[in-house]
Amino acid sequence: MTIRFALLGAGRIGKVHARAITSNPTARLAAVADAMPKAADDIAAQYGCEVRTIDAIAGAADIDAVVICTPTDMHADLIEKFSNAGKAIFCEKPIDLSVQRVRDCLGVVAANKTLLMVGFNRRFDPHFMAVKAAIDNGEIGDVEMVTIVSRDPGPPPIDYVKRSGGIFRDMTIHDFDMARFLLREDIVTVSAQASVLVDKAIGAAGDYDSVSVMLATASGKHATISNSRRATYGYDQRIEAHGSFGSVAAENQRAVSIEIANAKGYTRPPLYDFFMTRYTQAYANEIAAFINAIGGKGPASPSGQDGLIALALADAAVTSVKEGRVVKVSEVLG
Amino acid sequence: MTIRFALLGAGRIGKVHARAITSNPTARLAAVADAMPKAADDIAAQYGCEVRTIDAIAGAADIDAVVICTPTDMHADLIEKFSNAGKAIFCEKPIDLSVQRVRDCLGVVAANKTLLMVGFNRRFDPHFMAVKAAIDNGEIGDVEMVTIVSRDPGPPPIDYVKRSGGIFRDMTIHDFDMARFLLREDIVTVSAQASVLVDKAIGAAGDYDSVSVMLATASGKHATISNSRRATYGYDQRIEAHGSFGSVAAENQRAVSIEIANAKGYTRPPLYDFFMTRYTQAYANEIAAFINAIGGKGPASPSGQDGLIALALADAAVTSVKEGRVVKVSEVLG
Amino acid sequence: MTIRFALLGAGRIGKVHARAITSNPTARLAAVADAMPKAADDIAAQYGCEVRTIDAIAGAADIDAVVICTPTDMHADLIEKFSNAGKAIFCEKPIDLSVQRVRDCLGVVAANKTLLMVGFNRRFDPHFMAVKAAIDNGEIGDVEMVTIVSRDPGPPPIDYVKRSGGIFRDMTIHDFDMARFLLREDIVTVSAQASVLVDKAIGAAGDYDSVSVMLATASGKHATISNSRRATYGYDQRIEAHGSFGSVAAENQRAVSIEIANAKGYTRPPLYDFFMTRYTQAYANEIAAFINAIGGKGPASPSGQDGLIALALADAAVTSVKEGRVVKVSEVLG
Amino acid sequence: MTIRFALLGAGRIGKVHARAITSNPTARLAAVADAMPKAADDIAAQYGCEVRTIDAIAGAADIDAVVICTPTDMHADLIEKFSNAGKAIFCEKPIDLSVQRVRDCLGVVAANKTLLMVGFNRRFDPHFMAVKAAIDNGEIGDVEMVTIVSRDPGPPPIDYVKRSGGIFRDMTIHDFDMARFLLREDIVTVSAQASVLVDKAIGAAGDYDSVSVMLATASGKHATISNSRRATYGYDQRIEAHGSFGSVAAENQRAVSIEIANAKGYTRPPLYDFFMTRYTQAYANEIAAFINAIGGKGPASPSGQDGLIALALADAAVTSVKEGRVVKVSEVLG
């Protein structure tokens, strides 16, 4: 059986998913929609699919699944619309910037028993998958402490910052999800500190560019997260899990693995400098997992609930910084 | 302009090139030929091209270029046939196992002014390309000594060994080409030693599985090559160039970059265990370079002459082992 | 001029300092005192110095400097005694487990203008010194975030735990000092979380074995510290400083740098498994720095004030865990 | 029992051994001799030993062992003298630059049943010892191919070059010994190539600065050696052994293990730039092994025979380069 896809949103990340869908032998990209006709036309021309409106896609009998890559503020509405239309749904993170809105949306999804998967792409990075597999295979015993360092090569445009929901909901949210994924236990408290060290304009926009977070679970496991919007040496993405038998860590990735030695020392090239090249394989694996889930060959994971909890952790971090205190996750999630 | 391709030979390496061609926006796979109908049909079904005979392809007006992936003993004949037919030609290494036959074949190519490129895929590996670029950019000064370690995960089937032309013409030939590529100067002497340490059946077939080679240029530059048909830890592919200002080395590659630490130490996974996964990107780059050459945007390199010289170095190595002496390349090439 | 030393305390760390003193060409070990006659006799026999009482040393004209390696609860009294006796003093950390007692003691030191240096050995580790030098040389720009992972190979004996003052004052205190050393700015807030994951007996003794800490400075710089009393792979000691131009990190150290590759992967040996072998060079450098300070060739650093502040940060961390809140350093130091 | 030592030669390497002897609890440095009174006096003053003549040492009842660190042309005579005097002898490599002279000297040693150990310090480097231990423990199966890269930071003074016996007898000799040590089988053939790429003055002095060597054993095992008198990045000392189950390699060593990441990439400092700092621990281990051998607790290894064979391999390499052919070791050793 071939899964027939429609792509909602033909921007940067939409193109990534279009390529993943069309490269997958059990999927077919049937339609694309975008508010910008040119963007939709480009995808249609490259992959031989139809340009349609969102409504037409929702009503179409020849579409099994949609991939939502629109701006964030449309996510929840589209999830509800396509849940009601009976389509399987893959939605880029976050579902919404409001915990309550996410909850309402997931209520619709649950009522319709819609298959929904949320785009935390890092869970599908081969290196992070191998870290998870090592944990699941018991190679480090009980996980005790997870350490995540995640730094962007440079700050995003201020326009993006303003509508991003803030660094915790935009950037750290990936790390919140990864911490949960690796700890395999619910987070109960969040402590965060945040400052503006990279770009004063980010502070003027009400956001931060340098944050640290500590998380704890009920059984006393820890995670620490360190984020910066600047890393001159590329896209710094490290995770490490420490357990009772040992530790496992994923190394940073670079496009070219050479080393030059001279009188100044031994030098390797900088890291990947863009999340799309760094996570190329992760995006392909992610869509493959969604297709598997539709075919009943695997879970629809990360789920809407995973999306909700990661957002709640971000909300807790925001409160922690604002009020200078440790925040219980139950304060946000009830 | 789109380059219209025919694929000659739909086996393992043919499939790799089919994917590279069809992924390239300026190329189209129009036809495929193979003595095994099933193999050709599979490629045709997957990529929507026609199955044709070799003769039909040679006579077709809608084919610009061919990619020769047949067994080695057909290479030279096919090069001549398609040179005479006016097609651009990409041929897998080696052109032939006989230096004289290669020379005759290149004579036809020259007479026809055919664009011919030979498949030394390693020149297109991103890491080795970066090594070459570092040399070309003067980052290590004058290259003085090149060190190559190249080991296969395990020995090939004995049937393959028997028709391979021997380890020097089958395996070391890549390293001969790489040594020339990095030294940027002609090799004048070859010393080799060879033994059977991995599999006695290889010795019974008249071949070796463990070889060492020293090469020298007229100006006194050196290259050393170490080959084994066995490496329990994967496909070991290291090159290093040492120069007057410093050194540059390409590191081994693995699919997954994690490290597990426990009481036994720090362990990273084995290397890629198959040349096709190790050199995936190299194969794509190689076909892209061929397409560029056809479009006049780059050289047809490595050339037929490069193929000839690498084979001559292999012949010299065979003689060096047989006669226990240093062999001048001029003894082979005149 | 040769500095004449007396060693107060001939236990494990005393022996380390005895070797450092006797290896230094500008120092001489003249006397040793210990409550256990055998321990003092051993040092005396090995290095040819006299066994004396503490009082005799305090009154001796032939002693210029003392190195205090006694149990912690004697440190402050000894500092005062030898400050009053006019000797230069090197004291192992901590000066005392009570901030008030440390303050009183430092009052005596100040009144006597005694040269006092406190034993935060890690500042003298060649690798950490190189990290500091890179920062001081501007190689990473302004330091923004310091990340420290520090894990012991295994938990100490419970008897030790009981009199240690707790993990923050015993183990994390080194990391507090290192964070200050690298951030080069005062810490203003401390957030900590702590749990018992390694050994329930540690919890029964009222202490923790797994802790995470976040520190912030007035200008918004961060440090995060991750500690565990267990690391199956050896003595894990990593520091990293992230700045506006780049990052600098010290790698873990092992006695033997080999790598074995086989079908299971690439394995390097575990790390040093003992702080004394890990920090051999640091201890020698530390005593050399003390000797330099006495000779007027360098600062007496880390100072008593450094010892006081590190202890205050530990106290703040204890309060942070107990009360589940962010603690201002000013709450402790006033 | 304390072994009483005399040091013959108080130059650079003599000082290294003096420190090793005096640091060893079972040894005592009793006397020193040197043609330069100042050099001997310095050692005597530092370590409290007597300055004596060589004859006085030979006739002294209070000397058990001598360490020969004189210029090479005195080694064989001194070995014979002290063999006849009944002392245990440690001699720096090489015993002599003439194979025949070495043989005669070893004849005297054998007749006197003198305990003689030759200073191939690299066998005692902790990292290389660990490589050897991995082989001896069967961790890589049967050793098949040994690869050695050994490069000096820069060329020695021309005066030194002229009396060194040439690069093969001066520098490569260490690698010849290491190859034998790791292969654990006699070398039967030597092929070498050599050139002058670093410093024309070396060529004018009749020597080479860049050499490659291939060695083979009777059973078909290989070793390759790559030497250069120049490495801008420090003292490059790598060995690797490849076997039927896997490989083991020793990594290069640096004084400071930090890594700085910035827009230009990730940079680690250069390597040690001097053999004495690189091999500090090896020199100490070497003298400890000699003391153990005297005490009957271990073999006197490397032996005089090891010194002879390494020299013979150097002679074979010289002939191989001169005559452009593969040389049998039996041509040199008979």
Image: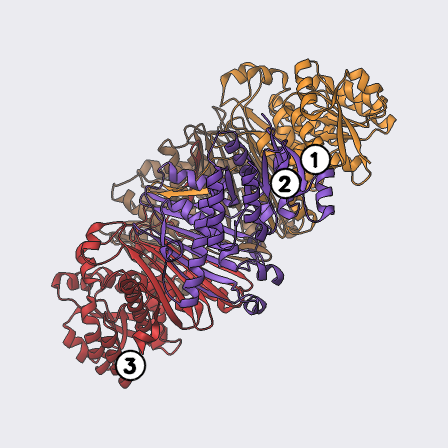
Chain colours: A red, B brown, C purple, D orange
State the CA–CA distance, disc 1 to disc 2. 10 Å
In the rendered image, the quadrant that contains the N terminus of chain C is top right
Q: Is residue D57 left or right of residue C180?
A: right
In which quadrant of the rendered view does residue D147 lie? Answer: top right
Disc on res. C7: 2
Which chain letter goes with mark 3?
A: A
Contact, CB < 8 Å: mark 1 with mark 2? yes
Query: Looking at the image, is C296 positioned above or below residue C235?
Result: above
Q: Do badges 3 and 1 share one subunit?
A: no
- Residue A17: image location, x then y, percent: 27, 64
Query: Looking at the image, is D30 positioned above or below residue A77?
Result: above
Which chain letter goes with mark 2?
A: C
Kind of residue sitting beneath label 1? Cys
In the rendered image, the quadrant that contains the C terminus of chain C is bottom left
State the CA–CA distance, disc 3 to disc 2. 75 Å
Q: Is residue C238 visible?
A: no
Disc 1: which residue: C49
Q: Is residue A199 visible?
A: yes
- Look at 59% across and 17% down and name the residue there: D160
Identify the secondary structure beneath mark 2. Answer: strand
Q: Nearer the viewer, residue B252 or A132?
A: A132
Which chain letter goes with mark 1?
A: C
- Residue D252: image location, x then y, percent: 54, 39
Disc 3: which residue: A114
Kind of residue sitting beneath label 2? Leu
